[in-house]
Amino acid sequence: QVQLVESGGGLVQAGGSLRLSCAASGTIFRLNTMAWYRQAPGNQRELVASISSSGSTNYAGSSKDRFTISRDNAKNTMYLQMNSLKPEDTAVYYCNANILTINWVIRDYWGQGTQVTVSS
């Protein structure tokens, strides 16, 4: 069994900051690319940023220059530092990870999501 658990969401005023965390646990042999997605009401889930196992990063246009993705491989944990938050950043943020398990199964896993609400 593999679990991804997000934390760090909440309510913040526009211009504020939040730091999301995603901790992976369970029958993990190798944690490959990890990513943050978000989904606002009525919208499709969209990529926010991704990070490879070696630390290469990729950002969606809306999050460039304001968000920073990082990971601690020793802790199997990924982070998303979000600065200068805007009301349009309001969404449920999901952690995604491509994982090779000890049973030699490789697939994507999702966390349960954490709500981020930015008030104007």
Image (cartoon, rainbow, N blue to C red):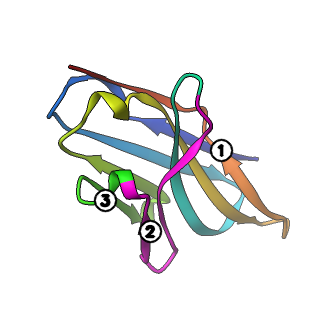
Q: Residue 110 carries which label?
A: 1
**Which of the 4 image quadrants contains residue 70?**
bottom left
Residue 69 position within the rendered picture, expressed as x and y whole percent measured from the top left: 36, 59
Q: In which quarter of the image is the C terminus?
A: top left
* Neighbour tally class for label 1: few under 14, some 14-19, many 20 plus, Cα within 10 Å: many
CB contact under 8 Å: marks 1 and 3: no
Gap in angstroms between the C-alphas marked 1 and 3: 23 Å
Gap in angstroms between the C-alphas marked 3 and 2: 9 Å
Q: Is residue 8 visible?
A: no
Per the image, label 1 sits on a secondary structure element best described as strand
Check disc 2 and give the amino acid type: Asn
Q: Name which residue lies at 47% across and 80% down.
A: 54
Check disc 3 and give the amino acid type: Lys
The relative height of residue 47 versus residue 13 in the rendered view (above or below) is below
Residue 50 position within the rendered picture, expressed as x and y whole percent measured from the top left: 49, 63
CB contact under 8 Å: marks 3 and 2: no
Q: Mark 3 points at which residue?
A: 64
Q: Is residue 60 left or right of residue 95?
A: left
* Badge 3 or badge 2: first in the primary sequence: 2
Q: Is residue 19 left or right of residue 6?
A: left
Q: What stretch is highlighted in magenta?
A: 43-61
Mark 1 or 3, closer to the camera = 3
Q: Name which residue lies at 59% across and 24% down.
A: 42
Magenta stretch: residue 50 in it?
Answer: yes
Check disc 1 and give the amino acid type: Trp
Per the image, label 2 sits on a secondary structure element best described as strand
Q: Name which residue lies at 18% across and 42% down.
A: 84
Gap in angstroms between the C-alphas marked 2 and 1: 19 Å
* Neighbour tally class for label 2: few under 14, some 14-19, many 20 plus, Cα within 10 Å: some
Q: Is residue 62 visible?
A: yes
Q: Name the residue under label 2.
A: 58
* Badge 2 or badge 1: first in the primary sequence: 2
